[in-house]
Each structure stands twice: as structure tokens, then as C-alpha cells.
Image (cartoon, coloured by chain):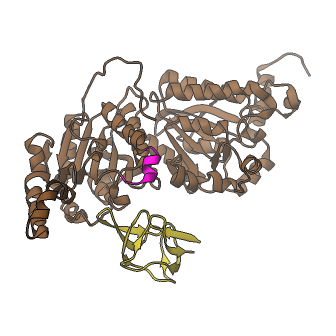
Chain colours: A yellow, B brown
Amino acid sequence: MIDVTAPMPGKIIAVKVAPGDHVAEDQEMLVFEAMKMEMPIAAPAAGTVRSIACAAGDAVQGGDVLAVLE
Amino acid sequence: MSSETTHASALERLRGLKERAERGGGSAAVEKRRKSGRLTARERLHRLFDADTFVELNQLAESQAVAFGMQEKKVPGDGVVVGYGAIDGRLTFAYAQDATVLGGSVGTIHGRKICRIMDEALKVKAPIVGLFDSGGGRIHEGFFASKGVAGMFYRNTAASGVIPQISAMMGPCAGVSVYSPALTDFILMVEGTSQMVITGPGVIQSVTGEDVTLEELGGARVHSEITGQAHLVAEDEATCLNTIRTLLAYLPANCEQRPPSLAPDDDPMRVDAELEKIVPHDFRKAYDMHAVIQRVVDDGVFFELLPKYARNIITGFARLDGRTIGIVANQPNVLAGCLDVNSADKAARFIRFCDAFNIPLINFVDVPGYFPGVKQEHSGIIRHGAKMLYAYAEATVPKITLALRKEYGGAVMAMCCVGMGVDLMLAWPIAKLVVLDTATAVNLIFRKKMQQVQDPQAFRDEMIAEYDHKYSNPFHAASNMLVDAVIEPARTRPELIKALRMLGNKQTKAPFRRHGNIPM
């Protein structure tokens, strides 16, 4: 199981996947805002989304688990 | 049997010895490794070199040690195959450790053979490739083996910046067998079958109590993503060896030569309207800088190094107008493209490699600054960031910087701006070159005024628009020669190529010094 984490403090703009979805490595899973920019958070490896731990609008800290892949 | 040596009898003896040497640790050992996808030392060398060009040296050298029954255990060749051959027709030296012979351990003769082939490579100034597959120093030979090992490190250092040195980890390697690669220019690893550690899991367990496998400690993923010590990872051995060939094709044979040139079949004056669409004018929107690079370079081919380490900066080789270039580029969709400890480290070493080997540097800039935080500060962003400044300032190869969007603050120097010895500073029309981003600057400069006006928000918006119109745009920077030319995004490729052609014969003379003192 792989934790998909926030790279730094910021805000979740959009969640692009749902539990059960298959994702490829580097596929965009979330849109994240920090340092005045919107950036994609990509899947670190191919897998299935086990759970999503955030929602659009959430403020997050660096290292917070946003989703879990298996 | 006659006691007289004839041609025939001597040849017969030679054949026997060669056959023994080529058997290495024996067919059973070889078979076992084949099952896990591992080739023999000679097979690796034959794949690395052009067909029928590999010449082996010192095949019959054997261990001279007598302690611990070494004279019964010894095998001709002493666990390493050394020699030279052609790679794409170009002379290259190589050595491959044979893990079937005493674990590929480095004994005195083994070390001497490697030192000898390194001396040869330095003598004729040609690249050298090390294929490592060794557990480290040979305990049975005790301290005497250290001379060979130290000799390797000494020569890696003597050769550094003189001839390209490439290492491939092709098995579990530890201790001395990883320090030599660490001194070379590039390290490749093979997925799953190679590891690099200084101290193995067993010792770690007994000293710190940590329970970890060799793969978790020092496998390909660890070194390509966490430590940044593996520049490239190959899925299997054949791909690894092929990648070494591809890498060498970008490089000159030594520091006195220019990199090889290919006849370009990609139009040097190719204009590309897509670039404006890939890079959003809205600075809040990220994009993938790889997409820009691929559209600009010859045939869209980019040989990236350390693709998964410090992903906020991109380093790698490509060709423009058929000539090798080194690219350093910010990656806006990772950490907003900010510089940090790891990216400064990654970039600085790459810049210095390019400078050592006459490879022009092209910098694609979209950087908002350094990544803030206690972690960065306490990890030494000051001295690590300074490495990048040093590397660019020191470099005397042609340096061309293109500001695509953000050129903010101190990061501007770290990405080689005017004053850092850049040869040509270019900018796209949408670029912003400022000390502080506009909104922050306005908030600071007009802090008191904003407390006095009726509608601070409207005043602020007005000041931001005015600031951008007057000061942050590249035309303003160009008016004071801090930008040499503002270019149309679509014309990026031809403009870079024209600049490279103009700088082709650049020569600068540095004043004498023994060497500088780069922040480490």
C-alpha cells in the first residue's frame, strides 16, 4: 500500500479519482494549490485507489496522507 | 612427453589457460545467475561493445596471496575482466567484475588490473566504463587488498573531468565497490538485481537494531528516488548496457574535445506555435516543462538524468542543431518549480560535468524562488543553493538562459542570469523578472498608503497592474540590458540554435589558481 501525500502545506482544489479507480504511474489524482500555483499530484506508481482522505477545499499540511493506493 | 616447448604445445597450454579463465567460477555458478537474469562479466562486455571489438588484457593474472588457502581458491583473471573496444566506433575502456569468482571481491591483483586499465584510459584519453558486481574488498587478502582499492579511488579522482567515467551497478555491491562508482560521473543501476550500500543489513541489525532488507536499504528505487545516487535505472541488464552506449554518444572522448556532432535532420529553423499553448500565461497554472523541452530539441529526444530525484528541477542531455547540449530546467508542476537543497545539488553537479566536457548549457527558467521552511533551512539550503551559484559562475562553456515565465528573486542567479557569466539572456514576452512577485512587492511598498485609501483592494489592483506594466515585464529588463533579447515563444528553437552557432568557438581564460573551494 502506498500513501499519496501532500508535498507541502496547501489546499486541495480538486479530487480527480475515486476509490476503486485504477491509476497508471504519473496519472493525475488530485489538483493541489500551494505557493500561488495549482499543481497536479500524480500517482507514484500504478495501482488501485483504496481510499481518498481529502476533499476539494481542504487545507493540508506537508506530508498529510491524501489518498492510499494499493 | 617431450620436454621441449614447441609452438603447438605452447599454444595448447595457452588455450587451456584461456578456457580456464573464461570459465570463471564455473558453469553451475553461471547458470544460477542466469536464472535471475544476470549475465556473466564477459557477456556484459560483449553487449556493451560493438561486435568483435573487445580486447581483453591481463586475462591470466591471478591472486598472489598465500593466506587462508588463496592459492587453492584462486582463479585466473582474479574475478575481473578488463580491456578495451569500440562503442559506436569510438575507443572506450571497460572492466567488468565477475561475481562468480570469490564473490567478485577486490583482491590485490583484481584491484591492480582495474588500476592498470584506468591508467591506460588516462594515457590515451578515452572514456572508461565500470561494470560493478562485487561484495567489496577480499577479506582473505587482508589489508594488502586496500592498495588496489585506494588505487581505484585515486585514479577515479585523477580522471575526474579528464575522461568520462560511467559506472553500472549490476549486482549487490557494498563498501569499496560503491565508493569507486560514487567518484565517477554517472551511475546506472539494474532494477531488482543491483544494490548499493556501505554497510549491509546484517551489521546494521547488530549495531542499530534496524531491520531492513538489502533492497530496501540500497536498491534501484532507493537510489534513483531518495538518495539521488543512481542517475539512471534500467529494467534489465541488456537495457542498462544499451543505455551506457546511448549516454556515451552525447559525450566527447575527453575534456580536450568537443562532443560528437550528428548531421541534424530536424530543421534548425523550425518554428512551433504549440509552445504558447503548452505554457499558460496564467502563472497560477502549472505545466510540464518536459513538454517544452521535447518540442525545442532535435527530434524531441531528451536523455534525462535523475528523472525521479529532485523532480522540481530537470537535468539531461539533448541535441540542438546536431550538437550535444546540457539542459537545466525548472519544473513548475513540482514544488511550484522552487529550488531546494536536493535540486541545487542535482543541478550543480550536472552543470560542472557539462563544463568539464565542453557541453553548452541551456537553462529553461520558470522559478518563483527557494522552497521555504525550517527543514530546508536546517538542511543547509544556504550552502547547497550556493553550489548552484558557484557551478554556473565557474562554467566557461556557452551558457544561454531563457526566462519563460517567473524569474523571481535570488533564484534568478541560481538559474544563471546576467552577471553570472551567461552568454545570452533571453526572455519570452510573458516573463516576469522581479526581485519579489508583483503582489508581494506592492503589498510591501504601498503598505502605509493602503491603510490610508478608501478602497485598499482597488488601489492594490491598480498598483499591481501598473507595476506589471512598468517594471516586471521583460521589456523593462531589456531596456537596461538585463535581458539581451525578448523572443517569440514559437521561435525558441531557432533563437537557441543561432546563439549556439555564434558561441561555438567560445574561449575564456581563467586566472591561475590551484582550484576553487566550492561549497559542499
Q: In this view, does B283 lie above or below A12?
A: above
On the rendered structure, is B276 left or right of B39?
A: left
Q: Which residue is at the front of the view, B371 or B251?
A: B371
Point out the residue furthest to the right here. Answer: B1
Q: Position of residue B200 (x, y in %)?
A: 71, 47
Which residue corresponds to the image point at 65% horizontal and 38% vertical from the top-left? B177
* The image quarter in which residue B423 lies: top left
Q: Most extreme residue toward the front, as rendered?
A: B452
Whether residue B438 is visible: yes
Image quarter of residue B479: top left
- At x 39%, y 31%, the residue is B356
Residue B263 at least partly seen: no
* Most foreground residue, B305 or B391: B391
**Is residue B378 found inside the magenta-colored segment of the image?**
yes
The part of the chain drawn in magenta is B371-380
Residue located 78% across and 34% down the image: B139
User: Which residue is more in the foreground, B358 or A11?
Assistant: A11
Q: How many labels does the image show?
A: 0
Q: List x then y, in percent, for residue B400.
A: 24, 41
Q: Residue at x 19, y 64 (%)?
A: B281
Whole-percent x, y for residue B257 in the image: 37, 28
In this rendering, would B70 be left or right of B394?
A: right
Whole-percent x, y for residue B93 in the image: 55, 32
- From the viewer's perspective, tell me whether residue B355 is left or right of residue B197: left
Most foreground residue, B394 or B171: B394
Check if residue B470 falls in the magenta segment: no
- Quadrant position of the N terminus of chain B in the picture: top right
